[in-house]
Image (spheres, coloured by chain):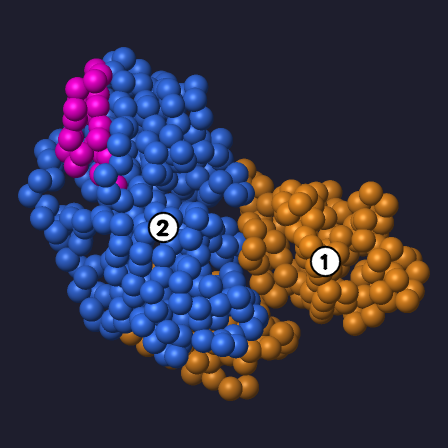
Chain colours: A orange, B blue
Amino acid sequence: MTPGQVVALGDSCLAIRFEATIDPAVNARCVALAWSLEHLAMRGVRDVVPTYSAVTIHFDPRVTDCEALRTKVDALASVPVAASAIDTRLIEVPVRYGGECGPDLAAVAAFGRCTEAEVVGLHTAAPYRVFMLGFLPGFAYMGPVDARIAMPRLETPRLKVAAGSVGIAGAQTGIYPCETPGGWRIIGRTALSLFDATRSEPFLLRAGDRVKFVAV
Amino acid sequence: MAALSIVRPGMLTTVQDRGRWGYQSSGVPVSGALDWFSHRLANRLLGNDAGAATLEVTLMGPQLRFERESAFAVAGAEFRLTLDDTSVQMNERVEARAGSLLKFGERLHGARAYIAVDGGIDVPEVLGSRSTHVLTGMGGYQGRALRTGDVIELGEKRSGGFFTHAREITSRPLFLPHGTLRIIAVDQRLTEYLTVGRFQISPRSDRMGYRLEGTASPAAATGELISTAVPTGAIQVPPSGEPILLMNDHATTGGYAIAAVVITADLPLAGQLAPGDRVEFEACSLETAGEALQQMEVVLGAS
């Protein structure tokens, strides 16, 4: 794999970019690098954010700078942490598919030229990888979704998507943590809470986790 | 200990502090005071901790009643202020008696003012911060902008260690209806476009981001990319060709090309721009960015 390209995004942010692709191996490398950087607990570092194919470090420019961080990143790059060393969890998410909970299940079945039960079968078949979190607190971008049910998002987003809604947007699947407008194809809903600031672990998911949907 | 009543809320008045750092990997936006300098100056005038929460006032100011004796200071956008119908100054410590009414009048310059009170605004911390993120209903006073009739609590009063006034602060930014923001290039071609272009802040601008109307970006600049994390101050160029300057409430990740990023020292100036204001961009180096920030920290008497 090619080494990451280090790019300053202004005076308080540094990105390490890998191949721009949605690929579990590239993402695993990002999650591993973010994990290593977090564990260095560097002064002035405010956030380390793994995404599909990059790791972004947000820092306080009063305390540290791009050059100091670049040195740390280079040192880590020469002794990469094996992705297997990262503690990834398998989390089961119970989902009620179809009906009021999944208003787009029929449309996804039509898209895939299959029955609704087959859509559920394909969506629950294997665990998905959590590539990254973003968009909303606790929102996980997961995938890859089987090509047969990888329906593109709605052309016009809904004004209101219920909290816990499970959706598909192309090869991605995700769960809405709160009620919000949204354009993903909603096929079901979970009663699990993705985000609760009052819990000791506020967020159900983190990048690198595997998620297995279970029909209930 | 209820201590501050909202008589009129103004256009958008929210509780803000330095921001909710540490949770961007879970998708939590940072939020926090758009003009970090004025927020800190207001706290500094009272001897508050730099992290104390203030009220961020937007374009049209509120009316507040002090329910207990308290000192306060207002910094940032210039408004005419009265306390019980007597004119009071910005950028200095003012004592309010219990029952005093602070009124914001005409706005002269800038977009956002910060009201600090002795001991800070005391709302519950959510994920380590008191900042309000209105879109997700997180933090601040019940996760929303203040309304008439709200009563907010103040923290423990502080004593000593404050500037009495900030008149000697000559390098305090002057907020005018136009500004030049210094940027660090990320994409050279798009940075050149930003530096030669002429822009104004669109009415479709808020704490999440400012849309920049004016010179359209070069044809077929960029499509949608794979989502990555983005910092506040980043100027994204979506396929529509209308750049967006990301402000503190922006989503943690984005899928558009980043042209350049506004330097930390100039974010306060960005926070003081209002819809209709003109803005220009000037490319600078990381060294210049560091020196500019250092100068501001000296003004604030960083400890």
In the displayed structure, B211 sits above or below A53; it is above
Quadrant of the snapshot with the N terminus of chain B: top left
Say whether residue B262 is magenta: no
- Residues tagged by mark 2 and mark 1 found on one chain of the structure: no
Say whether residue B77 is magenta: yes
Give the farthest residue toward the top. B99
| Residue bearing the label numbered 1 | A154
Q: Is residue A199 visible?
A: yes
| Residue B231 locus on image (x, y percent) | 41, 61
- Between residue B13 and residue A1, name the one nearer to us: B13
| Residue B131 locus on image (x, y percent) | 40, 40
Q: Name the image quarter holding residue B11.
A: top left
| Residue B289 locus on image (x, y percent) | 23, 66
Query: What residue is drawn where x is 12% and y is 51%?
Result: B171
Under mark 2, the amino acid is: Gly
Instruction: Describe the element under mark 2 as helix, strand or loop.
Output: loop
Q: Mark 1 lies on which chain?
A: A
- How crowded pointer 2 is (Cα within 10 Å; few <14, some 14-19, many 20+) is rated as some
Query: What residue is drawn where x is 41% and y is 59%?
Result: B212
Gap in angstroms between the C-alphas marked 2 and 1: 33 Å
Prevailing SS of the magenta stretch: strand
Q: Give the range drawn in magenta.
A: B71-97
| Residue bearing the label numbered 2 | B276
